Image (tube, rainbow, N blue to C red):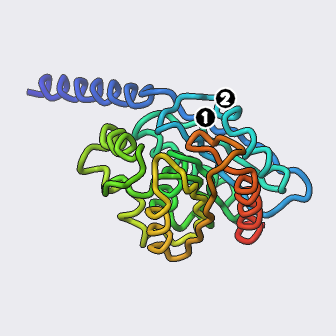
Amino acid sequence: MHQVARMTIILLAFVATLVSATVAGAGPKYYLSDNPPLEPVKRGVVITVHGGGWEGNYGAAADTLMAQYVGAYQRWGYRVYNLGHRPGRLSLVDTINAVERVSRKHPRRPLCLFGGSSGGHLVLMAAIERSKLVDCVIDQAGTPDLINRDTAPGWQKIHDTAVKYWGRRGVRQVSPMQRAKELVAPVLVIAPECDFATSIARQERFVRKLKRGRLLRQYAGPGYNTGHCELTWESILAGVAAQHEFLDRHAG
């Protein structure tokens, strides 16, 4: 009897060790670069998150993707952590973990999040899930509603991709529109009127649901192609100025 019990304990210990080893080695870790501020140094810290339809595993290449944003925020005096997340549903896991990690490292400094496209969606959700840690959010052309059909031509593809990663039931929990009241940090939504993924009317409705939301509308025209649509240079420069002012107000 004692021999059987002893063998059972050994077997359970072996299984526990195997499970631990499997979890520890499950997939690559996300990438997070630390980019120091330039003078004059501001109080706040910014986490930047790339877009790309929740795809990932870019590693250090994420710094190249986000170089213009990271560089601008550094020049404005902010320490910037740039995230290269893993793909699919792990993209949100990694974004939330990065928020926790940076917050622990800088517990007394304001923390703001920036994301574009799917990165905009990720920072909105991270601010919802970790509302006590986030002081402001800049969402550039993120899709706020993954549930209700939109008039934008690319919305269906965005919806189908989200369902693929989070499931038909789970997608509601990662749709910012459905959880807008939980977003307590001030949010700047930069919304192109020509965005292929989200209509301007949908973005306006989302901002109205936020407790502390502001919308900057960008206009279509010859200038610069963001990947979502072509915007006038005036709109691009207005977006940069709005980000600078927003960060200085909430984290400067």
Q: Which residue is drawn at 59% across and 53% down?
A: 140
Q: Mark 2 points at which residue?
A: 60
Q: Which residue is drawn at 58% across and 48% down?
A: 116
The C terminus lies in quadrant: bottom right
Specify the quadrant of the image occupied by residue 191. bottom right
Query: What residue would you read off at disc 1?
Result: 31
Q: Is residue 9 left or right of residue 186?
A: left
- The residue sitting at 70% across, 32% down in the picture is 64
Task: Tell me the quarter of the picture where residue 10 sits.
Answer: top left
Q: Which amino acid does label 1 sit on?
A: Tyr
At which x and y percent is residue 205?
A: 44, 69
Instruction: Return the residue found at the far left.
Output: 1
**Where in the figure is residue 211, as x and y percent of width and height?**
50, 76
Neighbour class for label 1 at 10 Å: few (<14), some, many (≥20)? Answer: many
Using residue 85 as the reference point, say whether residue 182 is left or right of it.
Answer: left
| Residue closer to the observer: 96 or 141 | 141
Kindly identify the amino acid type of the residue bearing the numbered disc 2: Ala
Q: Please provide percent x and percent y for residue 163.
A: 30, 43
Seen as rendered, the residue at the extreme right is 39
Disc ID at residue 232? none
- The residue carrying pointer 2 sits among few (fewer than 14), some (14 to 19) or many (20 or more) residues within 10 Å by Cα, namely some
Q: Position of residue 59 (x, y in %)?
A: 61, 28
2 and 13: which is toward the camera: 13
Q: Determine whether 97 is above or below 42 in the image.
A: above
Is 237 situated above or below 69? Answer: below
Screen quadrant of the N terminus: top left
**Count of marks placed on residues:** 2
Q: Element type at marker 1?
A: strand
Who comes first in sequence, dot 1 or dot 2? 1
Residues tagged 1 and 2 counted as in contact (Cβ below 8 A)? yes
Kind of element beneath mark 2: loop
Q: Is residue 163 left or right of residue 73?
A: left
